[in-house]
Image: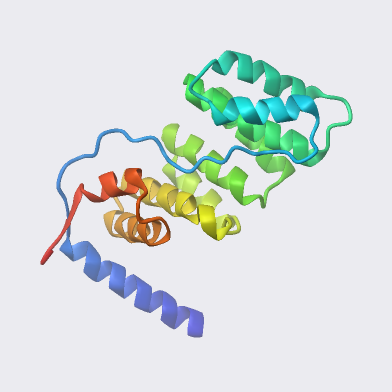
Amino acid sequence: MMKSKLFDARTSRLGALAGLLTLLAAPAAAGPAGTYVRTMEGGRPAAERCAAAAAHAGHAAADGIAICTKAIEAAGASVETKAASLTNRALLFRSAGDLDAALEDCGGALALVPDHPGTAVTCSAVYINAGKPDAAIGLLEGAPLPAPGVRYRYYHNLALAHHDLGQYALAYDFLQKTLETNPGFTPAIELKKQYRVAGE
């Protein structure tokens, strides 16, 4: 009963906000923010190099993809190491523009670690880029919240996914949460400029 009242109150507040929001212009295509690079502690050398390559996803993605593939195929690699390397390779495929391969790696990583918040954030970005905002929302809402220091990434991807679906009140709400968590996060600041709230 209490949950229902909270839901009704939030729905009512968002409904009121929707009436006050105006989208000023369609935003430029902005990449989802908040992808995690899955680092390994004590991991095999290939997994460590895979994580390093994913951290610099815009440079030499093909080399990074090859390194991550070795880490995924390494004999004796743990489930966690394989999932991390799949997540990092998805990030590299996304950077290289191969969204089909990125989606496939996300599917593999999520099958191994369905409740890992970092994998959820990274794969939600892949889903958004692939034109699947509903899948991104479902993934994020089903995952545990990331650690407080990186939670803004989770909220920002929810904002982008709701924005892509035309759910502007929800998008604005998650932009607010993003900026409460990380006030200087430039992608959220830029997206928020596309909205105007009556009376502001």
Q: Is residue 20 left or right of residue 84?
A: left
Q: Is residue 147 left or right of residue 109?
A: left
Q: Is residue 20 left or right of residue 8?
A: left
Residue 35: x and y in percent read 52, 40
Residue sticking out furthest to the right = 76
Q: Residue at x 35, y 51 (%)?
A: 184
Please determine whether, in this image, residue 97 is positioned above or below residue 165. above
Q: Residue at x 54, y 45 (%)?
A: 121
Please determine whether, in this image, residue 37 is positioned above or below residue 66. below
Asked if one can make out residue 165 in the rendered structure from this viewpoint, the answer is no
Asked if one can make out residue 115 in the rendered structure from this viewpoint, the answer is yes
Residue 181: x and y in percent read 42, 60
Please determine whether, in this image, residue 198 is positioned above or below residue 87. below
Q: Residue at x 20, y 47 (%)?
A: 194
Residue 16: x and y in percent read 23, 70
Q: Is residue 182 left or right of residue 46?
A: left
| Quarter location, residue 176 | bottom left
